[in-house]
Image (cartoon, grey):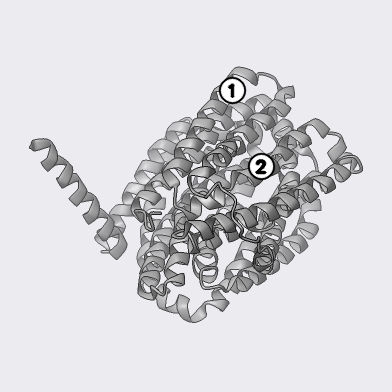
Amino acid sequence: MKTKKSLKLNFIFNSILTASNLIFPLITFPYISRILLPDGTGKVSFATSVIYYFNVFAQLGIPTYGIRACARVRDKKEELTNTVREIMLINICTTIISYVFFFISLYNIPQLAEEKELMIIVSLTMLFNTFGVEWLYKALEEYAYITIRSMVFKIIAIVAMFILIHDKNDYILYGAISIFAASASNLLNFINMRKFIERKKSDYRLQLKKHIKAIFIFFAMSVATTIYTHLDTVMLGFMKTDTDVGYYNAAVKIKTILISFVTSLGTVLLPRTSYYIEHGHEEAFKNIIQKAFSFVLILSAAVSVYFILFAKQGIYFLSGSAFNGAILPMQIIMPTVFLVGLTNIMGIQILIPLGKEKYVLYSEIVGAAVNLIINLILIPQYASVGAAVGTLAAELAVFAVQYAALKNIMKEIYKNMYFVKIFVALVLSGALASTIKLLDLIPFFTLLISMILFFMIYILTLTKAKYKLVLEMEAELIDKIKVIFKNRCR
C-alpha cells in the first residue's frame, strides 16, 4: 500500500471539498431561507441538533480515533483489515443502541413527537455515518475520492432543492435533501471499502478490548464538544421559539462554513502527524505544525474580522431582511472562527497525535460547563444573542485550557507568529474595505467588492511586512506559474 501521498495535493482536494461546502449553502440557503422563513429553517435546525446528540453516542468518538488507529497501520494490509473490522463492529453495536434510545425519546418527548417524520428522516445520518467509514478513507489520505464523491451528491441535492421546494411547508423535504447531500454518499464508501481491506476471512480473533479505552476518551471528547456546539440550538428550541432558532441558525450557518474552511488544512494533517509520531519523525512533526499554525492564524484572523464588519450584508445576502435578528448574534460569534482554528491545531494536530487526548477532553468539559451555565443565564432574556455569548465564552475556555496544557510548546511556536504585523494588516484592510458600505450597494456587490479589497490589502500588507509564510507561498506560486509558461512555450 502506498505509504505517503502528497500533502499539498491532499490539501488542494480538501480545499476543493471545503469550497464546495461553502458554495453549497451560498447557493441554496438564500433560496431556502426565503421560502421556509425563520420558522421552517428553525425546525430543521432544531431536529438536526437533537439528532446530533444521538449521533455522538452512535459514533462513540470513532470518526477521530479511527483516523489515528488506521493511519498507524495503513502500510500493513492485514493489520489494517483487522483494525477496520474491529472498529466497525463496535460502531454497529453503538448505533443500534443509539437508535433504541432515539425511538424511546421520539415517542415520549412532546417537542420531538410534534415533528416525528422530520426527526426520523434526519436520524438516517447515524446509519449513513456508521457504514460510511469515512475515517478509513481519511487515514489512507484518499482525499481525491472523498472530494469527487461528495461534490457529485451535493450537485444532485442542489438541483433537487430548486425543483422540489416551493412552499414553507416543504421543510421536511428540505431536511431529507440536506441529509442526502451530507451523508448519503457514505454508502459508496462501504461498497468501495473492499479495495483497501482484505475480503477473505482469516483465523484472526477480533480484539475489541484494545480499542475501547481510547474510543471512550474520544467519545467523551465528542460529548463535551457536542454540548457546547449544539446545546445552544437545542436550548433555544426548548426555551424560546422556532423563530429564535432560525435567527441563530442563520448566524451559525456562516460561522460553520468559515470554520470548515479554516480547519481544512488540519483535516489532512491528522493522519500525517500521527504517522510522523508513530515512526519517530519529530523534526518533520515540528515543521508541519509550525506552518499549520501560521497558515491558520493568518486565515482565521482575517475571516473573523471581515465578517464582523460585514455581518449585516452577509445575513441579508444569505437569508434576507427577515433575518435581521441574526446580525448581532453573528457578530458576537465570529471570533470563534479564530479560536476554533487555533484549538483545532493544538488539540487535534498536537495533543491527539502525541497521545495526550485527555487534555483535549478536559478543555471540552470546561467549555461545555461554561456554555451550559451562560446559556441558562442569558437565553431566557436575550434568546439568540445569549446563545452566541455562551458559545464565544465556551471557545475561549477551550483555548485557555489547551494553551495551558501546551504552554512550553506554544510559547516557542508563537515566537514566530509576528502578531503585530497581522494586527496592522487587519486594521488597514478593515478600515479601507469598510468604505465600500458608503456606496450603499445591494448586499451581494457590497460583499464582493469589499471582500476583494479587504483580502488584497491584507495580503499586500503582510507581503510588505515580510511575513515569512506569505512570502514562501507567493514564491512557490510564482515558480509554478513560470513552469506552466515554460511548458506552454515548448
> Is 64 displayed left or right of 278 in the figure?
right
Of badges 2 and 1, nearer the viewer stands 1
Q: Nearer the viewer, residue 36 or 89?
A: 89
Which of the numbered marks, if any, corresponds to residue 47? Answer: none
Q: CA distance from mark 2 to mark 1?
A: 22 Å
Report x, y in % for residue 238. 83, 46
Instruction: Give the farthest residue toward the left.
Output: 490
Residue 115 placement: quadrant: top right
Q: Amino acid at mark 2?
A: Asn
At 84% from the left edge and 48% from the top edge, which residue is drawn? 101
Q: Residue furthest front?
A: 203
Helix, strand or loop at disc 2? Answer: helix
**10 Å neighbourhood of mark 2: few (<14), some, or many (≥20)?**
many
Task: Please identify the residue farthest to the right as the structure is shown.
Answer: 108
Please report the residue visible at 66 percent of the width from the left and 46 percent of the height from the top.
130
Looking at the rendered image, the quarter that the N terminus falls into is: bottom left
Amino acid, disc 1 = Ala
Whole-percent x, y for residue 405 in the image: 57, 77
Residue 12 vs residue 298, the one in the foreground = 12
Q: Residue at x 76, y 46 (%)?
A: 50
Seen in the image, is 455 located left or right of residue 91? left
x and y percentages locating residue 163 in the rendered image: 59, 18
Q: Which residue is mark 2?
A: 249
Circles 2 and 1 in contact, beta carbons < 8 Å: no
- N-terminal of the pair, mark 2 or mark 1, is 1
- Dot 1 corresponds to which residue? 160
Task: Write the residue at 80% across / 31% down.
Answer: 117
